[in-house]
Amino acid sequence: MKILVTGGAGYIGSVLSRILLEKGYDLTCLDRFFFGKDSVQEISDRIHLIKDDIRWFKPEILKGVDAVLDLASLSNDPTGELEPQKTMEINYQGRARVAKLSKKNRVTKYVLASTCSVYGFQEGILTEESDLNPLTTYAKANMLAEREILPLANKSFSATVLRQATVYGYSPRMRFDLAINGMVLGFFKNSKIPIMRDGKQWRPFIHAKDTSNAFIKILEADPELVNGQVFNAGNNEQNIQIFNLAKLIAESIDLPFNYEWYGSPDKRSYRVGFSKIKETLNFRPKYTPKEGAKEVFDALKDGRASGDDPRTITVKWYKHLLREHSKEIEINGVIL
Ligand SMILES: NC(=O)c1ccc[n+]([C@@H]2O[C@H](COP(=O)([O-])OP(=O)(O)OC[C@H]3O[C@@H](n4cnc5c(N)ncnc54)[C@H](O)[C@@H]3O)[C@@H](O)[C@H]2O)c1
């Protein structure tokens, strides 16, 4: 079975690609490689790498592809606000383009990497049926992409939306701008976990390998179960309050629980229900935040991950790329 993963060199994509290869899939990764190719170097002899953009790649790339897992995007709220128009072009129109071209080119399954942040901050447990309340350009672009892509579903084209919780754990393209990974880095560098005030806010979490397995569950499911459907990807037990999360992290690393507060009290809190994916697809995450935190700490200790790599803070890296890009325009007069 031939699979195309967009954003396959990213934080989740590079973990997902490895699992797909282990399972014997024939894999193509389409990515702009904004964070370089290091994350897929080790598997480059087993994967077809294409440096291209979801906004303008040639549709021929999709010939013979059976399924598309669409992960490419500007991947968090602060990055989404750098140039809101570009966020809409990539995260909304770009991904709608991928889905429409997939359908046109007889791809049979398509999965959109969406986010639980489309719910915004609301009381109660948010399920796939809850109202959406997107509060940022990033969340709005995800909502618009979902709304344009789901109606493409028909008998020969299965389209599914996966709303992922906040991801954690080691990846060959490391991100320290995600809550758990960032706390571990703070602990590693200063022996103190940075906690955003007042620590009572709830957030849902999922390990990078588990969210990858959620994509694969959908990929391998009977289309009747997933076609035209939205699934939250996570685990009811991994809705955690930030202060308690910090305690879990200290326990996992087996060091005294030292912490420091930052920010003004964060009233943004939300909890998500993950029963649908469990009941429909028997999806059960295997990893816990404690295991993920230990894994990230070990990766920092043995040098597989570096807290000084500027690419690990997504928004800072995109800011840098935009600065470089505008210098290039000044010098060469080219608009990319
Ligand atoms: N990491 C999380 O906690 C999380 C949570 C919910 C949803 N998501 C979503 O999952 C997906 C993957 O997230 P991630 O954490 O791996 O992000 P990431 O930034 O590590 O990876 C995104 C990849 O997409 C590529 N890319 C960006 N724009 C592109 C374009 N126009 N054309 C081709 N490639 C492009 C980048 O080069 C990068 O390799 C994203 O859509 C993100 O919004 C992530």
Image: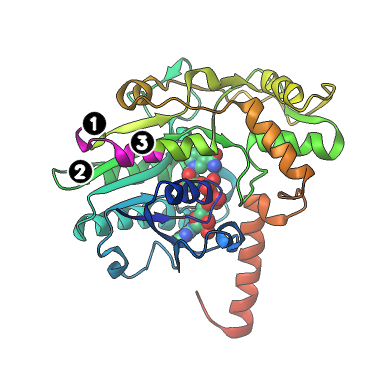
Q: Is residue 79 above or below residue 47?
A: above
Q: Which residue is mark 2?
A: 153
In the drawing, does residue 156 fall left or right of residue 232?
left
The label number, if any, that marks residue 217 in the structure image: 3
Q: Is residue 75 visible?
A: no
Q: CA distance from mark 1 to mark 2?
A: 12 Å
Q: Is residue 253 above or below residue 219?
A: above
Which numbered disc, 1 or 2, marks the residue that appears first in the sequence? 2
The label number, if any, that marks residue 206 in the structure image: none
Q: Quadrant of residue 231?
A: top left
- Magenta-colored span: 215-224
The reply to whether the magenta stretch includes residue 156 is: no
Bin the neighbour count of mark 3 within 10 Å (Cα to Cα): few under 14, some 14-19, many 20 and up.
some
The label number, if any, that marks residue 225 in the structure image: 1
The secondary structure type at the circle numbered 3 is helix
Residue sitting farthest toward the left: 155
Check contact, mark 1 vs mark 2: CB within 8 A: no
Residue 162, given in percent of the width and then of the height, sits at: 38, 37
- Residue drawn 24% across the image and 54% down it: 107
Residue depth check, mark 3 versus mark 2: number of the one nearer the observer: 3
Q: CA distance from mark 3 to mark 1?
A: 11 Å
Which numbered disc, 3 or 1, marks the residue that appears first in the sequence? 3
Q: Is residue 269 above or below residue 118?
A: above
